[in-house]
Image: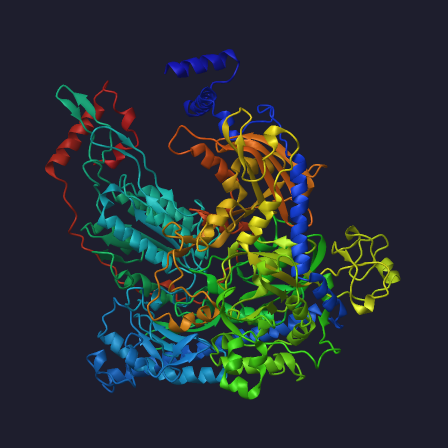
Amino acid sequence: MMMRMMMMRRMRMAGMPAMPLPVMWKYVILWMSLWSLALLGTRGELFGSTPEEQPNKGTLSGDVQNWATLIQNYILELANLGIGRDVTQRLFDSANYTFEAKDGDTLLSNVQTSLGDFLMRKRVAAERIAMMAVKLHDEYLINKRMNRTAKFSRLRDMPMTYYRDSDIPHTVRPKMFSTHFKQDVNQDYSTVKIPDQVPRDDESILDAVQYTVELDGVFRQNRKSDQMIRWQYFGTNIGLIRLYPGREWDTNFAGFYNDYDPRIRPWHIAASSGPKDVVIVLDCSASMIGKKFDIAKSVAITVINTLTKQDWVNIVCARESHWDSVGQWHYYTSEVLGCLSGSLVPATNAHRKDLIEKVSQLQAGGTSELEIGFRIAFDLLQSKPRSHCQSIIVFVTDGKDIDNEEVRCAPGYYTRSGYVPGPVCRYNWTKVWTLSEQRNAKIFPKARIFSFLTVDDGEIFPGKLSCMNDGVMVRLSDGEDLINKMRPYFDYLSQRTMEWDGLWTAPYLDAWGLGVAITYAVPAVSKITGRTIGVAGVDATLEEIEHFLIRYQWGAVYTFIINKQGETILHPKLKNSLSLLEDPIFITISQLEQDKGHPRGFSEIEKDLRNLKKGHKTIFKNGENITYYYGGAGGEYGFAFVLTKSDQIYRRAQEPQDYRHNTTSFWNLLIEYNSTLARDKLPGVYEHLEVRYNDSKYPLLTVSEKHSSIFFAPKCHCDPNKYFFDEELDDKTVHAHKYINLDEPDAGCDGGGQYEKGLRADVKITYPIEEYWASRQFEWIDQIKWTYVGMRSGVFRTYPGHRSTRLYDATTRAWFKRAKRDPTKTVISNAYMDSAGVGKIITISQAVFEGLPVISQEECVRKSEYGPWPGGCECKGDNECISRRCYMSGAAKFANDLHPRCATERVEAVTSLDMLYNDFYHQTVQIMESTDDGKKDYKKRGCGRAYKCPDNNWGCQTRCYLFDNEGYILTDDDFVSANDLDEKKYKEVSLGKKEGEIMKELVYKYGLFVRKEYVDFQGTCTITPYTPKVTLSGIPMIPEEQDDYYKFKGPIPAFSNSYGCIQDVVHYEADNSKLKETGMLTGNISGPCMSGFYYVTALPKTNLFVLVIENWKRNSSDKIFNFNCKITQSLVTSGAFRIINGTCSAREDESNSRPQLCPLLKNESLVNVTCDYNASNKLAPRWWELSWCLFYLLLMSAPGLGFRSSTRGLVSNTT
């Protein structure tokens, strides 16, 4: 109080207006914090010292510049001699190219037709299943009434002609592996799956098994009509599903079959209920504490899980504040849990996950003040946007009008006898009944209220509330089998469904192993009962849609797909659909194609895409004009192809003619050349390869140091799944060998071939580089493990020849992407574990440009009088070229050139070498040794050397790092000692994590690094903290083991420590222009982690920087844990960090709210639900409660006691 008076007096003296107490205290706390920091001397410790505070200067400036030059020369020499990029570039410059004009409108029409037909076949198949299911159900119902059906009392009595169960292995046989379904299936019959909580011998289950068995004929007919069709199924409303082809169900890590209930799967819910607006009101009062609130949360989560993207939802936690028995005030308030507190949110995966997480964290407490909660609920149902199709309130309560003895509606008072607590709160439910009646009369459509009573007997309040609002009350004794116990709610939704065309679902993770899928789902409505009997579904995987679209891409063209809500289904920036751990959260396309709303022209494109319009539009983006060709397909999806100006004329390399008949390339499955088939078809080849196994340089691997080998990425194959699961490796090898070497026509996929057209050209163009690689002789040749070139087509040539894993794709690897992004530099990777198992390695890469075109200088001047010029034009320096690379080609066609030419703008390939990390580290450290400048104190200041500090005390040393243009450390002595299996210790370790104070200055003082941040809605988190592997025993490492893992992994899956989550991804990008004219940044640091004088300079022809810290000394803390050091490091550390409420970042822009069309629904008056409750179980008030309330009311009316004002607003809670 004294401090408050002093502060207010000083403010008045200074002429400042008086502030409310909470605001004033904020300033008091801030002032005290700053004063404490000053007293403790932590300002310099936390934020670092300025150079003026540390007068000593560095002495290694000249050495650091020299070291940087020597290291760069070492890397460039290693790259030039080891990789031979100039040789590979000459090969592509020598190649012949054809010019192919690409018409975006024609492409658009072709894709629209093909993709539309692909989706239509799935739709027709699903409609056929639904129609047949209705026919079979109704016929069975008539026959049963006439006693003309087979009689079975138990499932086990049924013959297999009726009953094949996915949980009973012998009934699923015979099974065969299918590349289409990636597992063993029975393509002759379907199987059924029954949820664990559903009685297996229930009469309804027996009936469903009998009438659905006839669907097998429709399943087989659909498969005959569409060879690419995936899962077909019919999920009944009682929980049974019939699936074709038949499969044995998956097991959990304990060996038990996983449960499955189709009624809570997205495809079933979306088709059987139609769009709806749902508000869940939870009684969060203190009376719900314990089992009751656990049940309430389970009900809420069950309802959320049964919503789809077409629904709108929010949750209200209803309760208010109170006193307790000792007069203490407890603050509570009714709150909305969704990201938007004033409206409903779309029930997308993002918002559903957010609501489930928030519900899971709720704790009961507060009064049973529910009037405000219901007022909020009706406000939400009248907000916009929403579906306007159906309005539903789901209410969960214990029905008690008293919470407990600790919940009081007044503070109490003191008498001579002691303290008398306030009255126990008892609520008058009439207020909620009246409110619901008044508000519901103003809502269209009128809200139905479904109440769920947890454990207690208070049926009157929730029962009357539901019955007067055309709903149902259900009593729940526990949280088990909620789907069946909440049957009246789901029955109502299914009763309103009429027979309609169905819909495409949002993408979800297929429970049967095919990755992310979409389903065309059609409700089956009985013509006799008028009820929905189930839902028919047919799947299409995103994987096959992606492969379908990739076939239409070329050059730098990319494509994406969105739905009518603007959610991105496919995009190059999204994770591969097969790598997701949970149902994906799809963000709007604008977040991927725009940066803070720019370019604005894309908004019009997005609007047309949402409306499935066809057209094209050119906008200026990333420094060039980009054209979007877009259209719609399947009545649900919009797609677009994105072309730059250079993509409209596509140059395709042709097979070279000069050495067509005297070259031989070899497929990567070297050991298969020793097979009986290969020896017969390709005699002498195996002996020629001189294959070696388990060489000391390549342990456990099969290699040929005489030749390189060829590998095709999955995208090179016309049917990637068939390629991946093809176990006839000898036949695959023979066929591939003949394709890459012989003169057979290159038919491509459209001509009935196995491979995409044009791959053989890349194979033959790059063949001569093998001779260069095999004949290299230079100082560091023994340190090189692999040398390779990856082409944009997916062709991969590597030396020595060895096997690659089947899913390997060079174009998706980090080394390829980095070199493509920075093609004029030599790019070095971070340390990582070699996929073939040779150890901890680094990769040095250089880009190879598309072959030079022959362009006259006159034509170049016509295109640009003063430059920069396109590929093929003469140049004097890199700055005169659009590609930023000017070089003298070694190709014969340019032999008479007197001037170098500009490289083309398109990267054709990336060529690289791998070497062991320790070899690279020791070579660079050896370079960084200080020169002797004649001063006694500074003779031995090379990297890692220890010496006396400026204060003449021991403990200082020189620390040296190489780090890349993303702020990741490349060389550090800790990496050398790190176990190869402990990748987290050396792979993508941020400079901020090691030297936080210096990274902070590079970011915030000099601007050398720019912080970049985005939300990853498809992130991966772990349940337990990271721990390194201690052995590779039992883990597939070499390519053969990785490829065969799917065959030998067994039926019981390994326990997964990972789960899908939303992450904030932070990374940094270097801006070399921030380096001073000297090319070096320097500074003194004295921070919570360390002190010293640092130098930073770039290796300009690479992606690397050198950091040297002179007089480096670790700063010790007087505390057990140096919190200030950790804080400093965390401020500038790259990485992915889980966001607890990250789904709110995915909310939609209301200006782009999605269009909503209500399907045909039955009139409310035609949907009858039975609502009843026990009106005789109202708990009578106890005598002492009535007497206490009477006494308290008399007391309140007594003048002069001062209680009336303190209890205003809460007395209404008492009776």
List the single residue furthest toward the left: 1183
List the single residue furthest toward the top: 13
Q: Horizontal placement of 986 versus 285: left or right?
A: right
Q: Horizontal placement of 686 versus 555: left or right?
A: left
Q: Total marks drawn?
A: 0
Above or below, comparing residue 1171 to residue 1129 in the picture? below
> How far across and how far down the image is residue 652, in percent?
71, 71
From the viewer's side, name the closer residue of 644 and 525.
644
Q: Quadrant of the C terminus?
A: top left
From the viewer's side, name the closer residue of 523 and 1014.
1014
Q: Quadrant of residue 551?
A: bottom right
> How far across and how far down the image is residue 968, in percent?
55, 47
Q: Quadrant of the N terminus?
A: top left
Display colour scheme = rainbow
From the viewer's side, name the closer residue of 295 and 1080.
1080
Q: Horizontal placement of 986 versus 810: left or right?
A: left
> How far across and how far down the image is residue 757, in percent?
65, 76
> How far across and how far down the image is residue 1097, in percent?
65, 41
